[in-house]
Every structure is written in C-alpha cells, then in structure tokens.
Amino acid sequence: KLEWAIALRERVLRKFPGLQIAGIHHGYFGSMHASVIEAINDSAADIVMVGMGSPLQETWLAQHRDQMHPPFVMTVGAYISFLSDELPRAPQILRALRLEWFYRLCLEPGRLWKRYLVGGLVFAWLVVRARMRKK
C-alpha cells in the first residue's frame, strides 16, 4: 500500500536524515510497467525494494529485472509493513521458534491460509519428491 511506503519513508528519514530516497510507488500499476521501470531508471537509485506480496513481486521482478539499471534489486514482502509499523511483528518467542508465519496466519487467516497451509504442503511434497528422485 502506498500509505505504508509513505509512512516507512518518513520513519526512515527521521532515523537517517541524510539518506536519499529516490522515490516510492504503490504496486498497483497494472500494465504501466514501462513507465514504472523508466521512473526507476531515471531515479539513479542504487537499491530497489519490491514489496508487492508473494508471488506477485517475484514474478514481476523476474519478468522485468533485465530492464532495470539499479545494481541491487530485492523483494521484501511484508518487510515494508513491519518497518512502517502498519503490521505488528510476532512476539519474540514465536520469532525465535520460527513461527512468525503462524502468528501472521492468526492475524490474517482469510488472506494467508492458502499460501501458508496449502502452499506449504505443496512445497513440502515437491521437496520430498525431488529428494526421492535423487536416490
């Protein structure tokens, strides 16, 4: 969401006043990929963070990375939401146990159940199947 990116920019600039942020954009630009990529390239940014949600951000970046000039581009998922304080992090004990995904599932079950439960099981099956083929 654009509001989250704006909140993050303000928070980061308060913490690091000399930092230069070349620009921000929401992830809902439909077929305007060319103009977004042009704005990225015109900004002369060194780092681009793509936070459109998984798997959209990975797909978009795979399709358009070769058109972008910045040397470092990364997907960040919910990281922007956490940094902008729009989405709470899991308690430290759940993070230490690597269960932050479960905390997020409890916060947003309608949105995340398929990704975490179905997607996780499919991924686990694909890993098991790949390992069985190697033997």
Image: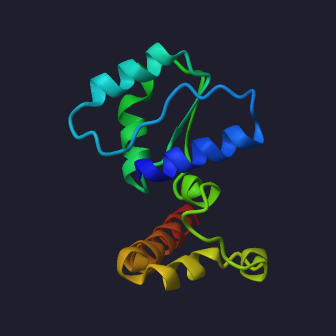
Res 122 → quadrant: bottom left
* Residue furthest out toward the left: 31
Query: Residue shown at 50%/29% (left/top)?
Result: 23
Does residue 64 appear left or right of residue 97 in this picture?
left
Q: In the image, is residue 71 above or below residue 12?
A: above
Residue 83 image offset from top left, x and y in percent = 64, 55
Q: In the image, is residue 115 above or below residue 22?
A: below
- Asked whether 57 or 35 is in front, the reply is 35
Residue 16 image offset from top left, x and y in percent = 76, 36
Query: Residue shown at 37%/74% (left/top)?
Result: 111
* Residue furthest out toward the bottom: 106
Query: Residue shown at 37%/40% (left/top)?
Result: 60
Q: In the image, is residue 124 above or below residue 39?
A: below
Residue 102 image offset from top left, x and y in percent = 57, 82
Does residue 72 appear left or right of residue 23 in this picture?
right
Q: According to the image, what is the colour scheme of the structure?
A: rainbow
Does residue 118 appear left or right of residue 85 in this picture?
left
- Asked whether 77 or 66 is in front, the reply is 77
Res 70 → quadrant: top right
Residue 53 image offset from top left, x and y in percent = 43, 55
Number of numbered discs overlaid on the protein picture: 0
* The C terminus lies in quadrant: bottom right
